[in-house]
């Protein structure tokens, strides 16, 4: 297999935490292990795992329908596929305070570098859609405190997301964020800020690292990572970009096959067989299988 230096998850968490306190990092979104491998292949330093993308991959809307067990099942494939720190969307923590404890234990245990949870009630809503209702500030602070107490590794990041900008107003988002910092959150994720000015002002108000969500077709302006780093943000995520590009192009492919009964016009848009094999390290597994077969044959010959 390819000789990649494998760091322990503790080393990856520590390095990631150090990086976001000194400089910024871009985290593209992966919705399965294969896209996570592409992120690593291209040279990014981390992976973001979107709850919306995982839900969509299961054919479900982003309203908290996936259970913790299902979520963990999907994520484990990703964390095992790459030698990169992975941050995941844990929705509302999958319940109340005691559930948050279990969520942290589970997600830390499968090798994540951190998770974020939001201050919405269940069933939750997509952060860029209307109709969201928030839990109380005090309740969210309890959940953050429980999450911080539940982690075994102090470098496992607890990121607090607030949806107060769209559910209430900008000032409430700032005040909630400050309370979440006091409760122990390592980072703050202000969801659905509506202007570049708001991004700048929020960064001036909060004294811990911030995460910016550059999701498409929402209410936030699409700023570059460079622009966001310059005003104080430390993590920039592109959570559903790959899924959206994939879905658009596969839809076009299916329409072409339905119309023409052929796919030849799409060959130049496809990943080749060899490119896929290289990505999943097929040859290494084939050699391993051959080695195992040779061992079995030698064992039988010695009888």
Image (spheres, grey):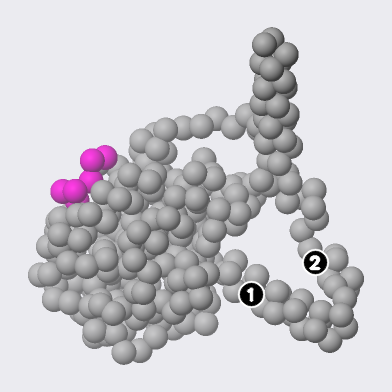
Q: Which residue is drawn at 47% across and 66% down?
A: 54
Element under disc 1: helix
User: Number of labelled discs?
Assistant: 2
Q: Which residue lies furthest to the front in this view?
A: 303
Element under disc 2: helix
Q: Residue at x 72, y 35 (%)?
A: 286
Closer to the camera in the image, 300 or 166: 300
From this view, report whether residue 46 is shown above or below residue 141.
above
Closer to the camera in the image, 173 or 91: 91
In which quadrant is the N terminus drawn?
top right
In which quadrant is the C terminus drawn?
top right
In the picture, the disc for residue 52 is: none
**Residue to which mark 1 is pinned:** 247
- Left or right of 299: which side holds 226? left
From this view, report whether residue 120 is shown above or below residue 89.
below
Residue 5 pos. (x, y %): 55, 30
Residue 273 pos. (x, y %): 79, 53
The region drawn magenta spans 148-153
Q: Residue furthest bottom?
A: 131
């Amino acid at each position: 297999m390819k000789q990649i230096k494998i760091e322990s998850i503790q080393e990856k968490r520590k390095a990631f935490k150090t990086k976001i306190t000194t400089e910024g990092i871009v985290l593209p979104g992966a919705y399965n292990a294969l896209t996570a491998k592409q992120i690593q292949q291209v040279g990014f330093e981390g992976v973001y795992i979107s709850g919306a993308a995982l839900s969509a991959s299961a054919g479900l809307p982003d309203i908290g329908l996936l259970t913790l067990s299902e979520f963990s099942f999907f994520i484990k494939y990703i964390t095992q596929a790459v030698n990169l720190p992975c941050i995941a969307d844990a929705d509302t923590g999958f319940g109340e305070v005691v559930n948050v404890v279990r969520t942290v234990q589970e997600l830390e245990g499968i090798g994540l570098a951190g998770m974020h949870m939001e201050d919405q009630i269940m069933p939750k809503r997509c952060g860029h859609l209307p109709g969201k209702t928030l839990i109380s500030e005090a309740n969210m602070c309890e959940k953050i405190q429980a999450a911080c107490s539940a982690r075994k590794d102090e470098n496992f990041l607890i990121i607090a997301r607030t949806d107060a900008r769209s559910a209430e107003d900008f000032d409430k988002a700032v005040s909630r964020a400050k309370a979440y910092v006091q409760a122990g959150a390592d980072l703050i994720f202000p969801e659905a800020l509506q202007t570049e000015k708001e991004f700048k002002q929020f960064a001036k108000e909060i004294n811990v690292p911030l995460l910016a969500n550059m999701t498409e077709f929402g209410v936030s302006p699409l700023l570059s990572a460079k622009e966001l780093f310059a005003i104080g943000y430390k993590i920039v995520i592109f959570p559903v970009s790959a899924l959206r590009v994939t879905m658009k192009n596969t839809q076009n492919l299916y329409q072409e096959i339905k119309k023409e009964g052929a796919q030849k016009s799409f060959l130049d848009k496809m990943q080749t067989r060899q490119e896929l094999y290289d990505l999943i390290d097929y040859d290494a597994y084939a050699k391993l299988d051959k080695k195992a077969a040779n061992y079995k044959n030698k064992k039988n010959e010695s009888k």
